[in-house]
Amino acid sequence: MGSRLFSMGVKMLDFFGDFPDMSRRDLRDFKLAIDGAFRDFSRTNGEAIEAFFDPLLWFLIKLEKLLLAMPWPVILVIVAGLCFLGSRSWKLSIGAVLSFMLIGYFGMWEDTMSTIALISVATLLCVAIGMPLGIWMAKSDRVQSIITPVLDVMQTIPIFVYLLPVLMLLGIGKVPGLIAVCVYAMPPMVRLTNLGIRLVDKDVLEAANAFGADSKQKLFGVQIPLALPNIFAGINQTIMMALAMVVIASMIGVRGLGIPVLQAIQNQYLALGLMNGLAIVGLAIIFDRVSQRYGKRLQQHRGGHDHD
Amino acid sequence: MKKLLISAAILAGTAFGLSGQANAACGDFQMSDMNWPSATLMANVDKIILEEGYGCNIELIPGATTATFATMNEKGQPHVAAELWTNAVSVELEKAMAEGRLHSAIRGPITELGEGWWVTPGTLSRNPEFKTVMDILERPDLFPDKEDPSKGAFIGCPAGWGCQLANQSLFRAFEMEKKGWVLVDPGSQAGLDASMAKAAQRDENWIGYYWAPTAPVGKYEMKLMDFGVPFAGAENWDSCIALGPEKCGNPKPSAWTESVVQTVVTSEIKAMPDVMEYFGKRIYPGPVMNGMLVYMEDNQATGPDAALEFLEKHQDIWTKWVSADVAAKVKKSL
């Protein structure tokens, strides 16, 4: 009696030891089936998908070539001009020009131009796709419940898990890099736009209704302007996350500041990593401050509680 | 009844506790678990044999060639690197060996190794006149770079790998830029593999760096190209080509150097005669290693799983590395 209980006890402990999982053979067949299906998909549709992205690739290449070919004084003038147009702040424009000069002096000019070409297109794409998506989510609870899990996946799935299929379809280069950056950097834009529009005071919306505004007038006249602080927070996060992805993009063959950082990581070149890392940080701060100032200027008419 | 259950639980508990105790006759040390399949297979096989057969207690530390060698050289940890491709660090390694900090336990733990420039099988079947790398270098138009179709793309090593410097030097030595080529940095092993896999699966032309024994080379039936120029000497390689164009301005054209792979150990391990004897005998035949790599690929096996498969399927090979009673102990634990 005692020994039977004892052996039962040991068996129970065994069962609760390792989780009862699928047999190895079944798991292997399952994994191989998925791989095989993807390989067939890639064989049949790969060329068409590559051709679909060709115009984007052409644009990215031309933009990078343009930035690399322009003489550096012209670039500095353009940087100063864009900063001033966006922020109307002398301090910021001069600071941006000084940062670029430092970057050039330390030998990181070409890499920075390549990174700017890719990241600016990525950020613009993220904002251009993310904001309408956020607005759509704000309008409908059902859409929100469908898109939110997609955003969760985009933000947390390990990058190479979805990059491997993309690489098999498109090869290494700028387009997979752009896709990687956008997948990671778009969710904050979408979420914060959604949040901003949903947070607009219901009373204000009622007042707009009372004045006879239709949906389009409400959206562009009331909701978006009032949601601007959140929308610009989204843009800020998108810029930060896009630049954070620069190193990962370099892991799949994108030229830019990420390559020296990878070299520094593998070979323990401390100074190289620090310098290029700080260049990435500098770019992020410039992009961000200019866009934030632009956002503040857009909201100037609200005055009152919006302080600098 | 309750007393019986309680004593059963205590017995079970102590049984679990005791089984965790390793026999400390051999010692605790760390082995490098490098991030490519053959290396992780070797590390895990070593761990099982040394723990079950010799009573060591081993911790596996992830790593890669340059980083692991640096920590072994500076800090003496990890204590063993089973598959160290020493070409990339040969000068530093010789210095460390001369100073007695590091030792080679065996040279050539895998037979039929090689680094070099490989092409997809379709490249050769479409262009039978390509007999050597020199022939290929004349035709960059057949390997258009996706981002600049006017140039030929040669896929080099990712940033930070030792071979990146060698490839950059050879790129300069063979004057490939003048011939219309561009050296593509794939960024990571994943990028290099994906580039090769995509070209092989879509049957496109591809030329780039790779090495054997590896699963992709076997899986995609890649062909190693003869360089067409002889190896221009160890002096040229070690003090010029391997250091890269930053440190050496005038590399001479050369075939790839013979790939030296060693199991490198620290002085603590050298003082363990049983372990050193095991390492000295531990040689994997090339075809067997390739077969294991294809197994790992097909079954997506991790290092520990593949090690178990190797120990079960290739008993005729590993039992020759150890004495009969060690072999019996290991077999019992499988």
Image (cartoon, coloured by chain):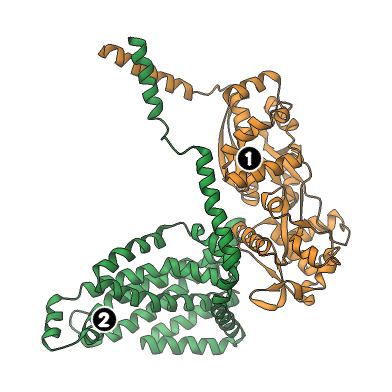
Chain colours: A green, B orange
- Using the image, tell me which numbered label, if any, was put on residue A224: 2
Q: Chain of mark 1?
A: B
Name which residue type carries label 1. Leu
Name which residue type carries label 2. Ile
Q: Are marks 2 and 1 on the same chain?
A: no
Q: Chain of mark 2?
A: A
Q: Residue placed at 20% from the left, 72% from the top?
A: A199
Quadrant in the picture for the C terminus of chain A: bottom left
Q: Nearer the viewer, residue A151 or B183?
A: A151
Is disc 2 placed on a helix, strand or loop? helix
Q: Is residue A209 left or right of residue B278?
A: left
Instruction: List x then y, in percent, for residue A236.
Output: 36, 73
Instruction: List x then y, in percent, for residue A227.
Output: 25, 77
Instruction: Examine the image and state in which quarter residue A306 appears.
Output: bottom left
Work out whether A25 lies above or below B140: above
Quadrant in the picture for the N terminus of chain A: top left
Q: Is residue A8 left or right of residue B32?
A: left
Instruction: List x then y, in percent, for residue B35.
Output: 60, 48
The answer to whether any part of residue B308 appears in the image is yes
Instruction: Examine the image and state in which quarter residue B108 appears.
Output: top right
Work out whether B64 lies above or below A110: above
**Label 2 with label 1: CB-CB less than 8 Å:** no
Q: Nearer the viewer, residue B166 or B138?
A: B138
The answer to whether any part of residue B75 appears in the image is no
Q: Which residue matches tag 1?
A: B41
